[in-house]
Amino acid sequence: MKNLTIIDHPLVQRDVSILRDKNTPNHQFRNVLSRIAGMMAFEVTHDFAVDDYSLQTPLEKTKGYKLKDDIVIVPILRAGLGMVEGFMNVLPEARVGHVGLYRDEETLEPVDYYSKFPKTLSKSLVLLIDPMLATGGSAKAALTFLKKKGAKNIRLVCLVASPAGVKIVEKNHPDVHIFCAVVDRGLNDKGYILPGLGDAGDRVFGTE
Ligand code: PRP
Ligand code: URA
C-alpha cells in the first residue's frame, strides 16, 4: 500500500471512535466529521508548495508565503459534503466542485447523477473527499470522471477505508495518493465496512 497515508494522530483516532459509536446523534456526528476533516487537511496539505512575497508588518518589511497551486475540493455527494467545511476552514482559498454518486443497493455499482467543476480543474490540485472507501467503486468512478474532465493532480481523502477499497484505487489510479484515518477489517455482504461507522450519508443527514 505504497500510495496510502494513514493519519493516526490521537485526536483523529479519538474522533473516529465518536463517529463509530451508534449512540452518537446526527448533530454531533456532523460536528465531529467536520472537525476531523480539518485535522486531516493539515496532513493532506503538509507538502503543498508555497510562493513567497514581500509584505509589510506594522514594524518592517518581511517575507510572506501563499499557496502556489489552485486548490479544488471535490466532495462525493452526499456524505463528502460533511467534510467540506472542515477543509474550507483551513483552505479558504479553495474552490469547490461536486460529483454526485450513489451505490445501487443491489449491485453496489456507483450511479452518477450530478457534477459541476470549476473551470480551473485541469490546472489545480484536486482533493477528492468522501468519508467512506468501501468496495472502492464510488472512488474509482469519481476519479475516472475527474480525469475525463481534465484533472491531473488528485489526492483522495477518506476517513474509513477497507483493504479492498484501497486496492481498487491503487490498481486503477496508481497516480492518486490516498489519505485516510483508519483501514478497517473488511466488508460485509452488503458492502458495508466492518467495524466501520454505518451509512455515513444517512448519519450526516439524519436519513437512517
Ligand atoms: C457512500 C459513501 C461513498 C460510498 C462508498 O455513499 O459516502 O460514496 O458509499 O462505497 P463504495 O466504496 O462501495 O462505492 P452512498 O452510495 O451510500 O451515497 P450517499 O452518500 O448519498 O448516502
Ligand atoms: N458507504 C457507507 O456510508 N458506509 C459503508 O460502510 C460503506 C459504504
Image: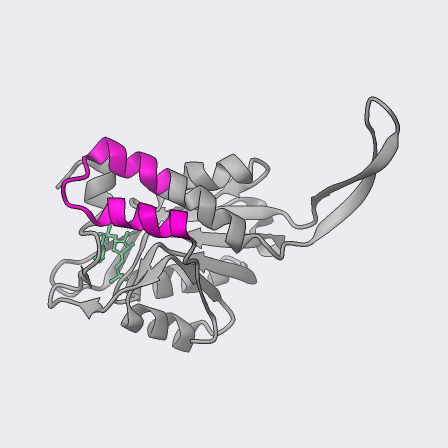
Q: Quadrant of ligand 1?
A: bottom left
The front one of 117 and 45 is 45
Locate residue 62, reporting x and y percent: 85, 36
Locate residue 182, reporting x and y percent: 34, 61
Q: How many marks?
A: 0
Query: For residue 46, which quarter of the picture?
Result: bottom right
Is 42 situated left or right of 70 in this image? Answer: left
Residue at the far top: name it: 58
Q: How is the image coloured?
A: one colour
Q: Which residues are magenta?
A: 10-34
Locate residue 80, reporting x and y percent: 35, 46
Residue drawn at x 59%, y 37% is: 93
User: Is there any visible trace of residue 99 in the rendered image?
Assistant: no
Vertical arrangement, residue 5 with respect to residue 79, above or below: below
| Quadrant location of the C terminus in the rendered image | top left
Residue drawn at x 25%, y 67% is: 135
Vertical arrangement, residue 154 with respect to residue 28, above or below: below
Query: For residue 205, which quarter of the picture?
Result: top left
Chief secondary structure of the magenta span? Answer: helix
Query: For residue 181, which quarter of the picture?
Result: bottom left
Vertical arrangement, residue 67 with respect to residue 59, above or below: below
| Quadrant location of the N terminus in the rendered image | bottom left
Would residue 149 be counted in the magenta stretch? no
User: Is there any visible trace of residue 204 in the rendered image?
Assistant: yes
Locate residue 73, reporting x and y percent: 49, 46
Would residue 21 be counted in the magenta stretch? yes
Is 80 situated left or right of 123 in this image? Answer: left
Residue at the far front: name it: 10
